[in-house]
Amino acid sequence: METEPIKVLLVDDHTVARNGVRLMLSSASEIRVVGEAGTASDALQLAREQTFDVALVDVALPGKNGLELLKSLRVAQPKLSVLILSTYSEEIYALRALKLGAAGYLTKDSPTATLIAAVRKAATGGKYVSPSLAEKFVGMISGQSAASHEALSNRELEVLKLLARGESLIRIGEMLHLSPKTVTTYRTRILEKMGLASNAELTRYAVENGLLA
Protein backbone atom coordinates (compact mmCIF):
# COMPACT_ATOMS: atom_id res chain seq x y z
CA MET A 1 0.00 0.00 0.00
CA GLU A 2 1.46 3.36 -1.03
CA THR A 3 2.03 5.80 1.83
CA GLU A 4 0.76 9.36 1.72
CA PRO A 5 3.38 11.84 0.45
CA ILE A 6 4.83 14.46 2.77
CA LYS A 7 3.43 17.75 1.46
CA VAL A 8 5.88 20.62 1.79
CA LEU A 9 5.46 24.39 1.61
CA LEU A 10 8.61 26.34 0.66
CA VAL A 11 8.83 29.97 1.79
CA ASP A 12 11.82 31.99 0.58
CA ASP A 13 11.94 35.30 -1.27
CA HIS A 14 14.75 34.05 -3.53
CA THR A 15 13.59 31.89 -6.43
CA VAL A 16 17.04 30.37 -6.82
CA ALA A 17 17.02 29.26 -3.18
CA ARG A 18 13.57 27.68 -3.57
CA ASN A 19 14.73 25.88 -6.71
CA GLY A 20 17.75 24.52 -4.88
CA VAL A 21 15.76 23.24 -1.92
CA ARG A 22 13.13 21.72 -4.21
CA LEU A 23 15.85 19.90 -6.14
CA MET A 24 17.38 18.56 -2.93
CA LEU A 25 14.04 17.29 -1.66
CA SER A 26 13.21 15.68 -5.01
CA SER A 27 15.70 12.90 -4.26
CA ALA A 28 13.26 11.59 -1.63
CA SER A 29 10.33 9.98 -3.45
CA GLU A 30 7.83 10.51 -0.61
CA ILE A 31 8.51 14.25 -0.23
CA ARG A 32 6.65 16.60 -2.54
CA VAL A 33 6.83 20.38 -2.70
CA VAL A 34 3.22 21.35 -3.35
CA GLY A 35 3.35 25.04 -2.49
CA GLU A 36 5.83 27.91 -2.79
CA ALA A 37 5.75 31.51 -1.57
CA GLY A 38 8.11 34.45 -1.68
CA THR A 39 6.51 36.48 1.12
CA ALA A 40 4.88 35.82 4.49
CA SER A 41 1.51 37.06 3.26
CA ASP A 42 1.56 34.70 0.27
CA ALA A 43 2.57 31.81 2.55
CA LEU A 44 -0.33 32.51 4.91
CA GLN A 45 -2.73 32.67 1.99
CA LEU A 46 -1.55 29.24 0.81
CA ALA A 47 -1.84 27.87 4.35
CA ARG A 48 -5.47 28.96 4.42
CA GLU A 49 -6.20 27.33 1.06
CA GLN A 50 -4.18 24.08 1.24
CA THR A 51 -3.05 21.59 3.86
CA PHE A 52 0.67 20.99 4.29
CA ASP A 53 2.62 18.62 6.50
CA VAL A 54 5.84 20.62 6.70
CA ALA A 55 6.78 24.22 5.92
CA LEU A 56 10.38 25.24 5.23
CA VAL A 57 10.62 28.93 6.08
CA ASP A 58 13.49 31.38 5.58
CA VAL A 59 14.14 33.82 8.45
CA ALA A 60 14.90 36.84 6.27
CA LEU A 61 11.63 37.54 4.46
CA PRO A 62 10.44 40.95 3.24
CA GLY A 63 7.93 42.47 5.63
CA LYS A 64 7.06 39.93 8.30
CA ASN A 65 10.14 37.84 9.10
CA GLY A 66 10.30 34.06 9.34
CA LEU A 67 9.85 33.90 13.12
CA GLU A 68 6.73 36.06 12.94
CA LEU A 69 5.45 33.91 10.07
CA LEU A 70 6.14 30.79 12.15
CA LYS A 71 3.69 32.01 14.80
CA SER A 72 1.06 32.90 12.19
CA LEU A 73 1.38 29.56 10.37
CA ARG A 74 0.89 27.66 13.62
CA VAL A 75 -2.35 29.58 14.13
CA ALA A 76 -3.51 28.97 10.54
CA GLN A 77 -2.59 25.25 10.62
CA PRO A 78 -1.95 24.02 14.21
CA LYS A 79 -0.78 20.60 12.97
CA LEU A 80 1.72 22.06 10.51
CA SER A 81 5.39 21.43 11.38
CA VAL A 82 7.59 24.43 10.57
CA LEU A 83 11.31 24.10 9.89
CA ILE A 84 13.34 27.29 9.80
CA LEU A 85 15.93 27.34 7.02
CA SER A 86 18.38 30.25 7.12
CA THR A 87 21.77 31.64 6.15
CA TYR A 88 22.22 32.69 9.78
CA SER A 89 24.10 30.37 12.13
CA GLU A 90 22.24 28.39 14.79
CA GLU A 91 23.61 30.65 17.53
CA ILE A 92 21.47 33.56 16.36
CA TYR A 93 17.98 32.20 15.80
CA ALA A 94 17.74 28.47 16.57
CA LEU A 95 16.77 28.71 20.23
CA ARG A 96 14.27 31.47 19.49
CA ALA A 97 12.70 29.44 16.71
CA LEU A 98 12.38 26.32 18.87
CA LYS A 99 10.88 28.33 21.73
CA LEU A 100 8.24 29.60 19.28
CA GLY A 101 7.35 26.04 18.32
CA ALA A 102 9.53 25.36 15.27
CA ALA A 103 10.16 21.71 14.46
CA GLY A 104 13.82 22.48 13.82
CA TYR A 105 16.39 24.91 12.49
CA LEU A 106 18.72 24.30 9.55
CA THR A 107 21.29 26.48 7.86
CA LYS A 108 21.19 26.76 4.07
CA ASP A 109 24.51 24.96 3.74
CA SER A 110 23.00 21.78 5.23
CA PRO A 111 23.60 18.71 3.06
CA THR A 112 20.71 17.06 1.21
CA ALA A 113 20.62 14.08 3.59
CA THR A 114 20.25 16.39 6.60
CA LEU A 115 17.46 18.40 4.98
CA ILE A 116 15.53 15.26 4.03
CA ALA A 117 16.00 13.73 7.48
CA ALA A 118 14.71 16.93 9.10
CA VAL A 119 11.62 17.03 6.87
CA ARG A 120 10.87 13.38 7.59
CA LYS A 121 11.24 13.89 11.33
CA ALA A 122 9.10 17.04 11.31
CA ALA A 123 6.39 15.24 9.31
CA THR A 124 6.05 12.66 12.10
CA GLY A 125 5.71 15.34 14.77
CA GLY A 126 9.32 15.19 15.91
CA LYS A 127 11.92 17.92 16.19
CA TYR A 128 15.20 18.09 14.32
CA VAL A 129 18.11 19.28 16.46
CA SER A 130 21.66 19.25 15.10
CA PRO A 131 24.45 17.73 17.22
CA SER A 132 25.96 21.18 17.84
CA LEU A 133 22.63 22.61 18.99
CA ALA A 134 22.00 19.57 21.19
CA GLU A 135 25.37 20.24 22.81
CA LYS A 136 24.32 23.83 23.41
CA PHE A 137 21.16 22.62 25.18
CA VAL A 138 23.26 20.37 27.40
CA GLY A 139 25.44 23.33 28.27
CA MET A 140 22.40 25.43 29.21
CA ILE A 141 21.00 22.64 31.38
CA SER A 142 24.35 22.20 33.14
CA GLY A 143 24.42 25.89 33.99
CA GLN A 144 26.79 27.31 31.40
CA SER A 145 26.02 30.93 30.61
CA ALA A 146 24.16 31.70 27.39
CA ALA A 147 25.32 34.30 24.90
CA SER A 148 24.17 37.79 25.88
CA HIS A 149 22.07 38.31 22.74
CA GLU A 150 19.84 35.37 23.69
CA ALA A 151 18.34 37.57 26.40
CA LEU A 152 17.08 40.02 23.77
CA SER A 153 13.62 40.04 22.23
CA ASN A 154 13.33 39.39 18.48
CA ARG A 155 12.88 43.11 17.79
CA GLU A 156 15.82 44.03 20.03
CA LEU A 157 17.97 41.55 18.12
CA GLU A 158 16.94 43.17 14.82
CA VAL A 159 17.90 46.61 16.16
CA LEU A 160 21.22 45.28 17.49
CA LYS A 161 22.17 43.87 14.08
CA LEU A 162 21.29 47.12 12.31
CA LEU A 163 23.22 49.21 14.85
CA ALA A 164 26.22 46.91 14.42
CA ARG A 165 26.05 47.45 10.65
CA GLY A 166 26.38 51.18 11.22
CA GLU A 167 22.80 52.19 10.37
CA SER A 168 21.63 55.48 11.91
CA LEU A 169 18.75 55.64 14.37
CA ILE A 170 16.64 57.42 11.76
CA ARG A 171 17.40 54.80 9.11
CA ILE A 172 16.65 51.95 11.51
CA GLY A 173 13.35 53.60 12.36
CA GLU A 174 12.46 53.78 8.68
CA MET A 175 13.41 50.14 8.08
CA LEU A 176 11.46 48.81 11.08
CA HIS A 177 8.62 51.37 10.95
CA LEU A 178 9.54 52.80 14.34
CA SER A 179 10.13 56.36 15.53
CA PRO A 180 13.76 57.39 16.20
CA LYS A 181 12.79 57.84 19.87
CA THR A 182 11.59 54.23 20.05
CA VAL A 183 14.79 53.03 18.39
CA THR A 184 16.79 55.00 20.97
CA THR A 185 14.82 53.25 23.72
CA TYR A 186 15.60 49.87 22.15
CA ARG A 187 19.29 50.79 21.94
CA THR A 188 19.39 51.75 25.61
CA ARG A 189 17.63 48.53 26.60
CA ILE A 190 20.00 46.42 24.48
CA LEU A 191 23.10 48.01 26.01
CA GLU A 192 21.72 47.47 29.52
CA LYS A 193 20.78 43.83 28.93
CA MET A 194 24.14 43.02 27.37
CA GLY A 195 26.30 45.03 29.73
CA LEU A 196 27.82 47.07 26.90
CA ALA A 197 28.57 50.78 26.76
CA SER A 198 28.61 51.85 23.10
CA ASN A 199 27.79 51.04 19.49
CA ALA A 200 31.44 50.12 18.97
CA GLU A 201 31.14 47.42 21.65
CA LEU A 202 27.88 46.22 20.08
CA THR A 203 29.60 45.96 16.71
CA ARG A 204 32.55 44.05 18.18
CA TYR A 205 30.16 41.65 19.92
CA ALA A 206 28.12 41.16 16.73
CA VAL A 207 31.23 40.38 14.68
CA GLU A 208 32.67 37.98 17.27
CA ASN A 209 29.36 36.09 17.58
CA GLY A 210 28.56 35.84 13.86
CA LEU A 211 25.51 38.10 13.96
CA LEU A 212 26.44 39.93 10.76
CA ALA A 213 26.02 37.07 8.28
Image (cartoon, rainbow, N blue to C red):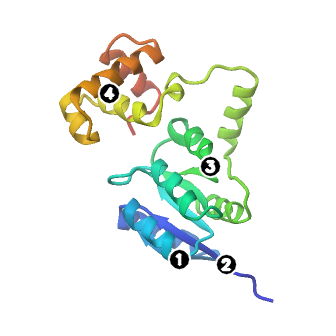
Mark 3, residue position: 101
Relative to residue 52, is residue 92 depicted above or below?
Answer: above
Q: Report, in whole angstroms, how far the alpha carbon at label 1 lies from the one at label 4.
A: 40 Å
Q: Considering only order in the chain, which callout, 2 or 1, is on the residue closer to the N terminus? A: 2
Query: SS class of the residue under badge 1?
Result: loop
- Amino acid type, label 3: Gly
Query: SS class of the residue under badge 3?
Result: loop
Identify the disc placed on residue 164.
Answer: 4
Mark 2 crowd level (few <14, some 14–19, many ≥20, 10 Å Cα): some
Q: Say which quadrant the N terminus sits in.
A: bottom right
Identify the disc placed on residue 50.
Answer: 1
Q: Position of residue 94 (x, y in %)?
A: 57, 42
Of 209 and 121, nearer the camera is: 121
Relative to residue 140, is residue 6 depicted above or below?
Answer: below
Q: Say which quadrant the C terminus sits in.
A: top left
Q: Position of residue 83 (x, y in %)?
A: 58, 56
- Pointers 1 and 3 in contact (C-beta within 8 Å): no
- Pointers 4 and 3 in contact (C-beta within 8 Å): no
Of 113 and 179, nearer the camera is: 179
